[in-house]
Amino acid sequence: MGLLNIRITPTNVPSELFPLRQMGKEHEHLMLDNVDRLGIMSMDIAKETRYTTQQKTLLDNLRRCIINEESHGGHEYTVDGLVGWFIYNLGLNMFPLYLGVQPRYEFRAGNIHIRSAPDYTIERDGKIVFVDEDKHKKSAPSAKSMLGEYQLAGEMLVSTLSRDPVGDIGVYGMRVYNTRFSFYKAYIPEKYYMELGSVPLPMKESMDVIRYPHKDGTKDRISSMSLDYADPQERSIIIQCLLGLKDRLLS
């Protein structure tokens, strides 16, 4: 990330971010009977008898996000509904966790001034997860997709200033683009923190952010850097990631 020298490294190993939690029977409803994208779009949700009202709400949110993606839309409210469903149904807003809605962060270093307001933060005892909803259209240039990543990384950096921000600092991120999820973990070497705020920029040391997943051979950049909840196989991994993130906050 330019003058602040933030480096994002993709990985195919989710345990490099946090341990995943295997799903129990209490989470099987999140799999939606393994329905795929085509099934979500073709079913009459109101007439379905195999799903609970909770599952129908999730299916409706997924369908709205798929329509938004296929129309190259940038409608934030469709993603709001999906992210909100997961936050409340997984108890990510329940004590001892704290849910922040569009909290504001500000940071100055040399001639760099960062202002950020992530969509949500989930916090406990110094550990924090930033949740950003990607508002760029799918048809936008890949550089804009990257811009969202570095915005999230900047938010993760700002949050460290109120804690001891060296090493494994318990700062995580999640980006959601319609039905697609990406997960992040920040790592700040001690030399980077010592240099932070010095002038002149750019910084020589780098802040490292690990992103999961990284998929080769996909048709577009968004698919290569995210997991799709509309895909039953990737759905299972997303659920394990969400449960693992919650466990990490509660540990």
Image: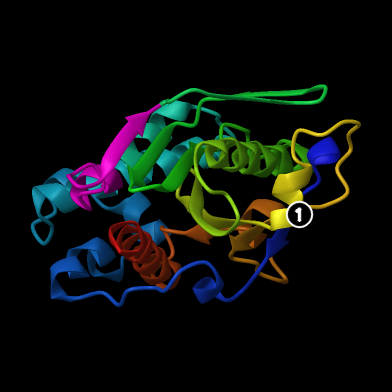
Residue 108 x, y percent position in the rendering: 70, 24
Region of the chain picked out in magenta, as a range? 86-101
| Residue 119 lies in the magenta-colored region | no
The residue at 91%/31% (across/down) is: 200
Residue 187 x, y percent position in the rendering: 62, 58
Is any atom of residue 207 visible in this view? no
Q: Of helix, strand and loop, which one carries label 1?
A: helix
For the residue marked with disc 1, what is the amino acid?
Answer: Lys
Res. 109 image quadrant: top right
Is any atom of residue 143 visible in this view? yes
Position above or below: 111 against 140:
above
Query: By what rule are the colours in the image chosen?
Result: rainbow
Out of 212 and 34, give the one closest to the viewer: 212
Q: Quadrant of the N terminus?
A: top right
Which residue position is annotated with label 1? Answer: 191
| Residue 100 lies in the magenta-colored region | yes
Position above or below: 152 against 17:
above
Res. 112 image quadrant: top right
The residue at 19%/76% (across/down) is: 24
Out of 225 and 223, give the one closest to the viewer: 225
For label 1, the crowd category at 10 Å Cα-Cα, with few meaning under 14, some 14 to 19 and many 20 or more, is few
Residue 120 x, y percent position in the rendering: 40, 35
The residue at 20%/67% (across/down) is: 27
Instruction: Describe residue 125's horizontal placement relative to residue 170 as left or right.
Output: left
Q: Quadrant of the C terminus?
A: bottom left
The residue at 59%/65% (across/down) is: 213
Q: What is the total number of numbered labels drawn onto the structure image?
A: 1
